[in-house]
Image (spheres, grey):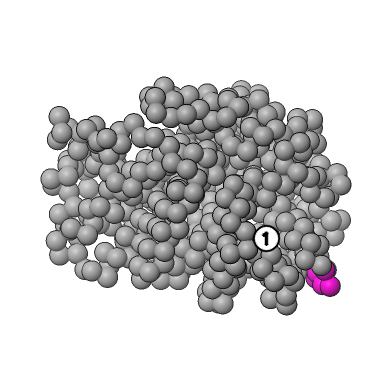
Amino acid sequence: MKNIAKKIGVMSALFSVFIATGCSDFLDESDPSNFTVENYFTLPAHARSSVNAIYAPLREPLNSGFGGGAWMMTEFATGLAATDLGQAVNSYFVKDLRNTSDNGYGQTYWAQYYKGIASANLSIEKIPGIPGLDAAEGKRIMGEAYFLRAFYYFNLVRMFGNIPLLTKPVDLLSEDLKPKQATPEEVYTQIVADLKMAEESGLVWTDKSGKVTLGAVKSLLSQVYLTMAGYPLQKGASHYELAAKKAEEVIDSQQFKLFTTYDDLHNPTKKNIEENIFMIQYKTQILPGNWQVAILPYNKNISAYSDETGGIYSTADFVKSYDAADLRAKEKQFFYTKFTNEKDRNLQVDLGGYFIYKHFDVVAQTSSANSDLNWPVIRYADVLLVYAEASNEVGGPTAKAYSAVNAIRTRAQLPALASLSKDQLREAVWKERWHELCFENITWFDMVRLRKAFNVTTKKFDNYVGHKFSYGPVVGERELLFPIPTVELRNNANLIPTKGY
């Protein structure tokens, strides 16, 4: 039985070694059905392929179709997203603040991210014992594993609160097969420890193949510290300072820069370079991203894709909350309201809403129906705004803080900020985060850590609890977390249900 359990664990961790980054050293073509603990982790190549497997669950929440997509969960929770996809009931449950623990979106995140953690735990334990593995290379590969484990836990703890914290492989005989929940403080302590290990692992600053880099590690660490400064831990000034320092290291490295045009945000030739610090990898004809159907209006016949789902788009109220001169709100910058007919590209179609253009693969939509676009996870724009917010909290407005936020505003063709008080700059930076990072799975996390929500009518910030969405629902305390999925509660009696669900 023990050998069966081991084989199950290894197969789970290694089954998805195909990562499809378009880079041959990021693929592994061995037959994972032959793997057991006894015959795997015996060759240097096994280190690379085992860590490749840790990346695979990043993609699963992005799978989209007529049932919606798990990535939409944190977008509908902001109150800034709309949908015309009536059969995607999980979207409506979140959007209308009627969510339950049966929501399949939450289950997808929970199951896939713990699958990634299981793969990371196995690699971290086994790679050091691989004979003949170059020490420096092994350390770098381990750095990727530590980063990815930290990333998965960072998202899970923010979504679900008290969660199991597992750092060792688990088989059917393990005491941790049905683990108890850890506190958020314990989870964040592990996240920071993992990222510090990754930071010292010898990773390069940038990598066009899409693997984890030092730039990604330091950027994520700045985000973690910024979150720890706010709710629920409320570490305050000490962690704002840490967040500013890490973001500043990324800025001062001069390894990254903002794109000069918003078109580059969804240009496949710009994957993993310049502004794109860390992305979820896709490859046309091999493993294309399928969220393209989700950002199309419902059956308007504008796309080469046969499925046009109307899965998610922006509320008009949110787009109208941008300043009148803001380039981001102009047609085919962050949003689009018109497009040409698929049968006659000279015929313009009014779409009846503000659809998401920043994720729009033009070639796939107009001809190939096979996207080559990556999904952005960490952009340099986010790093600049982390630095501006955190440094302002520590020492008030400074020239460098203004420089960071004004780089974002200059690209948006907005006037530079100047001569603001600390409180004024704080809210100005928050507003830039809402407008710059929308629909990238970031805004809801900002709302929870700040306990604030952007009011699209007043253009001010409300308290999160009690905030009224522009279409009616009012946020309650239970919306500070997503519910632990019902199936997990059934399978593990040690788990305590999320308050309010």
Residue 269 can be seen in this image? no
Is 7 rendered above or below residue 406? above
Q: Which of the 4 quarters of the picture holds residue 140?
A: bottom left
User: Residue at image x 86%, y 47%?
Assistant: 458
Viewer-side residue, 307 vs 448? 448
From the top left corner, tell me how far across and down residue 109 is, in percent.
48, 38
**Residue shown at the point (80%, 59%) measured from the top left:** 326
Q: Quadrant of the N terminus?
A: top left
Q: Is residue 417 visible?
A: yes
Tell whether position 171 is magenta.
Answer: no
Amino acid at circle 1: Tyr
- The local crowd at label 1, few if under 14, some if 14 to 19, many if 20 or more residues have their Cα within 10 Å, is some
Query: Bounds of the magenta span?
Result: 416-420
Position of residue 460 measured from the top left corner of the image (x, y, whole percent): 82, 50
**Residue 400 placement, left or right of 305:** right
Q: Is residue 441 above or below residue 472?
A: below
Please state if 482 lies on the left or on the right of 489 as rendered.
right
Q: Which quadrant would the C terminus be assigned to in this image?
A: top right
Residue shown at 75% from the left, 61% from the top? 426
As rendered, which of 205 and 413 lies closer to the eye?
205
Please name whichever residue, 335 or 161, is drawn nearer the observer in this view of the structure.
Answer: 161
Asked if residue 295 lies left or right of residue 182, the reply is right
x then y, percent, for residue 386: 63, 62
Residue for badge 1: 262
Local SS, label 1: helix
In the image, residue 114 lies at what x, y percent? 40, 40
**Which residue corresponds to the image point at 86% horizontal and 56% vertical from the top-left?**
324
